[in-house]
Image (cartoon, grey):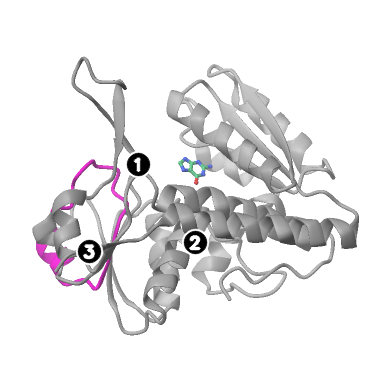
Amino acid sequence: MSGNIIDGKAFAAGLRARVATEVAVFQKGAGVVPGLAVVLVGDDPASQVYVRNKGKAAQACGMTAFDHRLPAESAESDVLELITRLNSDPTVHGILVQLPLPGHLQASRVVEAIDPAKDVDGLHPVNAGRLALGQFAGPDGAIVPCTPLGSLMLLRDRLGSLTGANAVVIGRSILVGLPMARLLIAENCTVTVAHSKTRDLPDVCRGSDILVAAAGRPGLVEGDWVKPGATVIDVGINRVDTPSGSDRPYKLVGDVDFATAFEAAGAITPVPGGVGPMTVACLLANTLTAACRQNGVEAPAWLG
Ligand code: GUN
């Protein structure tokens, strides 16, 4: 058996094109340009790349992007002040604070300061709570975190119905693992959430028809952990050093050892070019959803 590659880059390009079309429709109807504010505290090099890409992607689909950079040593009150300003700015419909934050700042306090209606990351307790309660639909439905939402889109596109599948999610983060598990439960999967303390992780993984790796550990999942024919979603984006003399100082690798897992999997996302582009495309979809709701307009149904 050998895997089929799930081309997240191509799928994301299609979703971004759809968002751009819907932005134009919304703008024409409501007379409003959706606005996304991206906040970066500090100068983490990977985060700088991510926020630049998010801003550029928002502009490319017809939105306004607002770029806010704060120094690493900013006090919590500085960050909260900015968020308060963005909450009351009518040209801003979505707010994203790039994580991780510098160590002296508490992410939960910062995220909780964001107006839940503008929380396009879906991390505010109101959105996380709605997701936990299974409230997805309508103007009061959860805004769903971008990476799990994008991963689910890829799974649905590849597999159609997920009903009855055994799914293992490695990782229990608020950003990916927990919301991913909740979405898969809503798809009628039987879900196991595994983590660093799970006993015999390889064996747990071998039981899964759907394996989502979101552990943040490069190459953790080896080919013989993958059930033949399983669908593997690799959420990891890890920078690993390259040998001296290479063109680049680092390369990006996932949480899955692609070369061996590809041989076993029925389908697998690569890194880069798998889940990463979906995260950005879903951020744009969530921003348009937020802008629609804030203007009393029905938002597009991204998941169908
Ligand atoms: N850091 C890594 N991924 C994400 C994301 O999806 N949202 C935010 N806010 N920070 C991140």
**Mark 1, mark 3: which one is toward the viewer?**
3
Q: Which mark is residue 3?
A: 3
Segment tinted magenta in the rendering: 201-222
- Image position, residue 51 (x, y; %): 56, 34
Element marked by disc 2 = helix
218 part of magenta stretch: yes
Left or right for 57, reference 107: right
Amino acid tagged 3: Gly
Query: Marks 3 and 2: which is nearer the front?
Result: 3
- Taking 61 as reference, is 183 above or below it? below
Query: Which kind of residue does numbered mark 2 sit on?
Result: Leu
What residue did someone put label 1 on?
Answer: 237
Magenta-drawn stretch contains 290? no
The label shown at residue 5 is none
Question: Does ligand 1 reach within 8 Å of label 2's beta carbon?
Answer: no
Q: Is residue 114 visible?
A: no
Residue at 16% x, 72% y is 207
Quarter of the image containing the N terminus?
bottom left
Residue 20 appears at what percent x and percent y? 70, 55
